[in-house]
Image: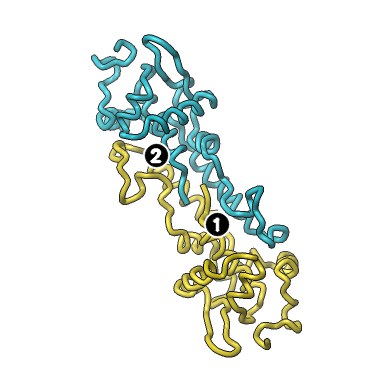
Chain colours: A yellow, B cyan
Amino acid sequence: MRVTRYTDYGLRVLMYLAVQDGRRCTIRQISDAYGISRNHLMKVVQQLAALGYVEAVRGVGGGISLARSPGRIRIGTVVVAMEPDLELVECMRPEGKCVISASCRLTGILGDALQAFIDALDQSTLADLVEPSAADGLRLLLKLDPVGGPGDASSA
Amino acid sequence: MRVTRYTDYGLRVLMYLAVQDGRRCTIRQISDAYGISRNHLMKVVQQLAALGYVEAVRGVGGGISLARSPGRIRIGTVVVAMEPDLELVECMRPEGKCVISASCRLTGILGDALQAFIDALDQSTLADLVEPSAADGLRLLLKLDPVGGPGDASSA
């Protein structure tokens, strides 16, 4: 059982943007920092923008930034929105053909467990992931300058 | 996010055996009833036997049956034992290379949510899946004769 790479990258983009404290950055900066494919990230960022998590400004001084404060971004809600498929077993999918679906209790039990998973994630917001004690470490690992420092993307 | 087909089939085998009320059956009967690959099922049954859920008897009158009562088989425990991979995101895997792992709070949050998922599943046992009101429907859909009827596998 895995979360797709798509959702994984979506969460990483949000964390990257959250430690920028409002500064804009480019997709290339994010893909370079994580060492992951820029093409993949383009689609991920498009989706995050369509969902209202990310805001893109074109042109000189442009780039992407969070469209709302980290405290208003719940992790479970992001996972549900990004994950292309939460149909854990065959009977949950439109093409499912399991012969016992009509009398099977497992579907309900798995559905409840999935909801418990999402509820647990929703107890945390993006702000919890980048609270001060974590944010400094993240900025260091992502090779970001401290907020307001010389590498400020909005002045580059 | 999906449970592997392997685990899905494992749960189906257990449900099939549970509505047999102790009668032995063959892998072919199970694969015919569900319309799924016998080769896949062989591996699944081998693992269920290795885990102590299923008992196999060779020779004439042989076959497979549950090795313990359905009330002693917790669904979350089966999923954990059968699922080859519960490493939801890259940083949870040995080959993971995410650069922010050292300062990332997401790993812990996802781990807690996964535990909530498993705990929710563990609230149900195989006996809950085949309680009388469900078992009759399951036997009908699996084309099984009522317990003790003429199609009793142990007398075939």
Residue A17 image position (x, y, % from top left): 61, 73
**For the view shown, which residue lies furthest in the bottom direction?**
A60
- In the picture provided, is B140 more to the left or to the right than B68? left
Against B11, is B61 above or below? above
- Front-most of residues A9 and A86: A9
Q: Is mark 1 on a helix, strand or loop?
A: helix
Asked whether residue B127 is in view, the answer is no
- In the picture provided, is A146 more to the left or to the right than A21? right
Q: Whole-Å distance between the Cαs marked 1 and 2? A: 23 Å
Chain identifier of the residue bearing label 2 in the image = A
Chain identifier of the residue bearing label 1 in the image = A
Q: How crowded is mark 2: few (under 14 residues within 10 Å), some or many (20 or more)?
A: many
Identify the residue shown where x is 49% and y is 29%: B73
Q: How crowded is mark 1: few (under 14 residues within 10 Å), some or many (20 or more)?
A: many
Residue under numbered circle 2: A106
- Front-most of residues B3 and B42: B42
The quarter in which the C terminus of chain A is drawn is bottom right
Whichever of callouts 1 and 2 sits on the residue coming sooner in the sequence is: 2
- Find out whether the residues at labels 1 and 2 contact each other: C-beta distance under 8 Å: no
Residue B53 image position (x, y, % from top left): 49, 25
Residue B148, image quadrant: top left
**Residue A145 badge:** none
Identify the residue shown where x is 31% and y is 34%: B35
Q: Which amino acid, by three-letter code, is at mark 2?
A: Leu
Identify the residue shown where x is 36% and y is 48%: A92
Residue under numbered circle 1: A121
Q: Which amino acid, by three-letter code, is at mark 1?
A: Leu
Residue A38 image position (x, y, % from top left): 56, 70
Residue B98, image quadrant: bottom right
